[in-house]
């Protein structure tokens, strides 16, 4: 019986790391090609997990008026204590994306 297709990110990443470690060793061409293919699939799965997490983070960051403001993941300002007031002048060029859920 095959394993379920639903794995979590950490399990997938651990499998990818094991494939990379094995490829770093001395393996025959056939085995290397199989490992490379498996690694590419695992890498794609990891990217899918990360993209989903990034989208959730963007949705969860709400502005004061209730509109959803998309912000690039991982780019936090340390002086962002009093809300969006610091960013209001450069909203046109900031690269932030506003999303509407129609709720």
Image: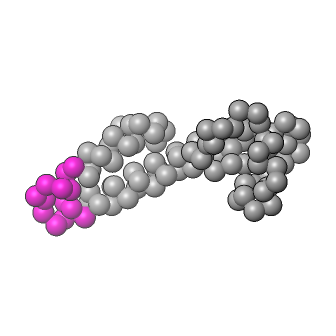
Nearest the viewer among 92 and 60 is 92
Q: Quadrant of residue 91?
A: bottom right
Asked whether 31 falls inside the magenta stretch, the response is: yes
Q: Residue at x 57, y 45 (%)?
A: 74
Q: Quadrant of residue 34?
A: bottom left
| Outermost residue to the left | 26
Q: Is residue 70 left or right of residue 46?
A: right
> Can residue 56 be seen by looking at this rendering?
no
Q: Please give the range of residues in magenta.
A: 21-33
Asked whether 15 falls inside the magenta stretch, the response is: no
Name the chief secondary structure element in magenta.
Answer: helix
Q: Position of residue 80 (x, y in %)?
A: 69, 37
Q: Residue at x 18, y 56 (%)?
A: 24
Q: Position of residue 31 (x, y in %)?
A: 19, 60
Q: Residue at x 89, y 38 (%)?
A: 65
Q: Quadrant of residue 60?
A: top right
Nearest the viewer among 65 and 26 is 65
Q: Position of residue 62 (x, y in %)?
A: 78, 38
Nearest the viewer among 92 and 25 is 92
Quarter the C terminus occupies: top right
| Outermost residue to the top | 81
Q: Is residue 26 left or right of residue 93?
A: left
Quarter the N terminus occupies: top left
Q: Is residue 31 left or right of residue 44?
A: left
Q: Residue at x 21, y 61 (%)?
A: 32
> Can residue 33 be seen by looking at this rendering?
yes
Q: Is residue 17 left or right of residue 13?
A: left
């Amino acid at each position: 019986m095959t394993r379920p297709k639903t794995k979590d990110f950490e399990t997938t990443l651990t499998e990818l790391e094991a494939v990379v470690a094995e490829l770093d060793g001395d393996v025959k061409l056939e085995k290397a090609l199989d490992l490379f293919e498996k690694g590419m699939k695992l890498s794609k799965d990891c990217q899918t997990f990360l993209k989903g997490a990034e989208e959730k983070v963007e949705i969860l960051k709400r502005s004061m008026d209730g509109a959803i403001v998309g912000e690039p993941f991982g780019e936090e300002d340390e002086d962002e204590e009093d809300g969006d007031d610091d960013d209001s002048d450069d909203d046109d060029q900031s690269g932030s994306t506003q999303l509407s859920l129609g709720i």
